[in-house]
Amino acid sequence: MEQRRYPGHNHWFYESQTRPTMSPAVPLVPEAAHIDDRFLLGLRQDAHALQPLFRDNQPALLAARDLSQLLFPDSLTPTLTHTLTLYDRLSTALTVAQVAGVQRLCNHYSARLNPVPGPDSSRESNNRLTQITQYARQLAMQPELITAASVSALAAVGLTEPDIVTLSQVIGFVSYQARVVAGLHALQGLPVRWLPGITPPPDAEREGFGVARRWHPTLKPLEQRYASARQLTALTFCQAQPDLNEAVWVLAHDPDVLYGWATLRQRLEANTFTALAQATSARILGSRWVFQHFAGVGMLITAVEDDAKENPQQEVIALAAQLTRTPERFSAAQLQPLLNRGWQRGELFALIQAVAIGNWNSRLLLRWEKPLKPANSRVLHQKMLSQRRSTSGFSNHQRRLARHAGDLNRTLR
């Protein structure tokens, strides 16, 4: 089909404010597209005081940079099973960056999106882009609103199972990247946001937390007999992370990103408070299946924060909550309580990365889960269904006769 996209996205609000002009619109910061490190986005060159921190975390930062190159290459050719175009990926990344409010990311993805040809002007293409954008905005802003119907809506506009997995990985990666960049800005004492942000959504409801849950994917898992060599390699590599044993069969629809994501998780440094930080993110975002993998975090179910207590645990929770809810408002003020307790920059950056990867994990695995009902309630439910089926064939006349017979028996007694 002929490409009929007019040039000019009006920068960030590209999906609804295009204009029919022959002069191409110039992005706000055009040089933001030409950066060697597309994960840190120039922070390595700007932050001279943090060079020792970058050297110490080189393995994880390299894994993240490889993922950025994999998810957002310079050119991309869609196939029958992987229909997401480069425009789809970059527009989704820009949407997530706008929700996060991190200006450095908005500059980069808007500059990269500007010269990329968009979809044609057909109604089908508009519906497809609308559903992709809506899904990205909801998963980035308030993941608990995502339901099985949201995934079905993507399939209804032509996205395949590999497309949906890749789209969720793109949203998760940019959410992770936004919080790492916001944390590095805070370590330098720099502002993250240049423009007013949005009102943060409420935390997830407490119902369902603390209840055992089983894996019940919305998408069809990959069958081993149909797995390719790359998919089998990624599945084998993920065996070292037992909490992913069930999830990997869905995520293997995009094996390269799955391998990179598992590599990043493996290379991130852990400390005493890493699990608490990730559990805080899962509690706020509503990822109950992820939350159940952490021990000793039951106090988060009732209330995420307890202002009456002042201890390192509550300060870590407060930091993780702020970075999860509003990364654009994260600043050096959130780091100061831990600095006063003697924390070093390396420990703070490890905590920031733990919160960031927790946001990725929770968004990626949020809606592919199902609560596990207790055995007694399951049996009772089945009995009620069987009784309902046994009486469903009665006519109204038969019910009246049965009621009359019962009244007669009570009278004779």
Image (tube, rainbow, N blue to C red):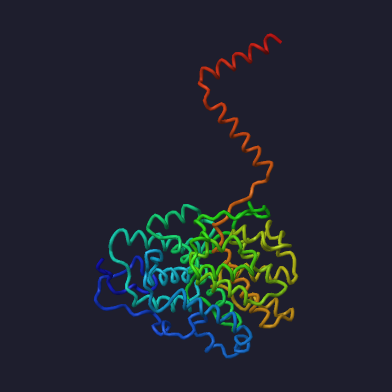
Looking at the image, how many numbered discs can be counted on the residues? Answer: 0
Between 320 and 65, the residue placed more toward the observer is 65
Between 178 and 373, the residue placed more toward the observer is 373
| The residue positioned farthest toward the top in the image shown | 412
Is residue 90 depicted above or below 398 in this figure? below
Q: In which quarter of the image is residue 261?
A: bottom right
| The residue positioned farthest toward the front in the image shown | 225
Residue drawn at (70%, 77%) of the image: 338
Residue 391 coordinates in the image, percent (x, y): 56, 26
402 with respect to 128 (left or right)? right
Is residue 95 depicted above or below 268 in this figure? above
Q: In which quarter of the image is the C terminus?
A: top right
Q: Quadrant of the N terminus?
A: bottom left
| The residue positioned farthest toward the bottom in the image shown | 48
Q: Quadrant of residue 245?
A: bottom right
Residue drawn at (34%, 80%) of the image: 26
Q: Can see residue 187?
A: yes
Residue 127 coordinates in the image, percent (x, y): 35, 59
Between 182 and 399, the residue placed more toward the observer is 399
Residue 375 coordinates in the image, percent (x, y): 68, 44
Q: Can see residue 174?
A: no
Residue 4 coordinates in the image, percent (x, y): 25, 69
Between 249 and 276, the residue placed more toward the observer is 249
